Amino acid sequence: MKHPVLIVQETPRQAGVIRLLELSNAYAASLYPSESNHMVPLHELEEANVSFFVARFGEAILGCAALVATGEGSGEIKRMFVDEGARGLKLGMHLLEALEEKALQRDISVIRLETGIYQPEAIGLYRKAGYREIPPFGNYLADPLSLFMEQQLVN
């Protein structure tokens, strides 16, 4: 019997998530110099202002994403990653939808993100979901290898 893929809010400190975060780190390091990687470490994903989601197929964790509430009605997507073997299953879109739903529950009306220019699949996902390019935000500096995007949420 097949198990459906579920998107569930969970703790990031578990073996399947740590494996994905390590894969994500290695992938980013293969594309960008360290100064252009803006990875949030595991302990920051456990803070109260973070909602962390995993995509599960049975016991297997296939993807993850975090929504960091940054104050004044805004949030940032961090650590979105889908296992290479699970790509094409639309898990990124399902994770994004879960983050947006959680944002509305937390009175977050705008979600921002930073991604790299050498990740066309991620950029395509965000554009398809209505995210638009913006200048650097928060503590980010302009970087020719970074793309900054945001989405205004409507209840």
Image: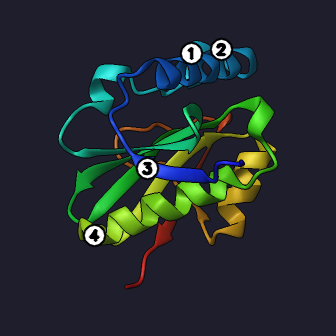
Quarter of the figure with the C terminus: bottom left
Given the image, on which type of amino acid does mark 4 rest? Answer: Gln
Give the CA distance from mark 3 to mark 4.
15 Å
Q: Nearer the viewer, mark 3 or mark 4?
A: 3
**Mark seen at residue 22:** 1
What is the number of the mark on residue 105?
Answer: 4
Q: Which mark is residue 26?
A: 2
Q: Say which element carries label 3.
A: strand
* 94 to 64, vertically: above or below: below
* Mark 3 lies on residue: 8
Q: Earlier in the sequence, mark 4 or mark 2?
A: 2
Q: Distance from label 4 to label 2 (Cα)?
A: 33 Å
The residue carrying pointer 1 sits among few (fewer than 14), some (14 to 19) or many (20 or more) residues within 10 Å by Cα, namely few
**Circle nearer the N terminus (3, 4):** 3
Residue 118 visible to an observer of this rendering: no
Q: Residues within 10 Å of mark 2 (few under 14, many from 20)?
A: few
x then y, percent, for residue 98 = 47, 60
As measured in the structure, the alpha-carbon distance from the residue carrying label 3 to the one carrying label 2 is 25 Å
SS under mark 4: helix
Residue type (three-letter) at the residue carrying disc 1: Glu
In the image, taking residue 93 as reference, residue 138 lies left or right, namely left
Q: Amino acid at mark 2?
A: Ala
**Proximity of marks 3 and 1: CB atoms separated by less than 8 Å:** no
3 or 2: mark nearer the eye = 3
Q: Residue at x 47, y 36 (%)?
A: 141
Which one is in front in this view, the residue at disc 2 or the one at disc 1? 1
User: Regarding mark 1 in the picture, which secondary structure is present there?
Assistant: helix
Q: Which mark is residue 54?
A: none
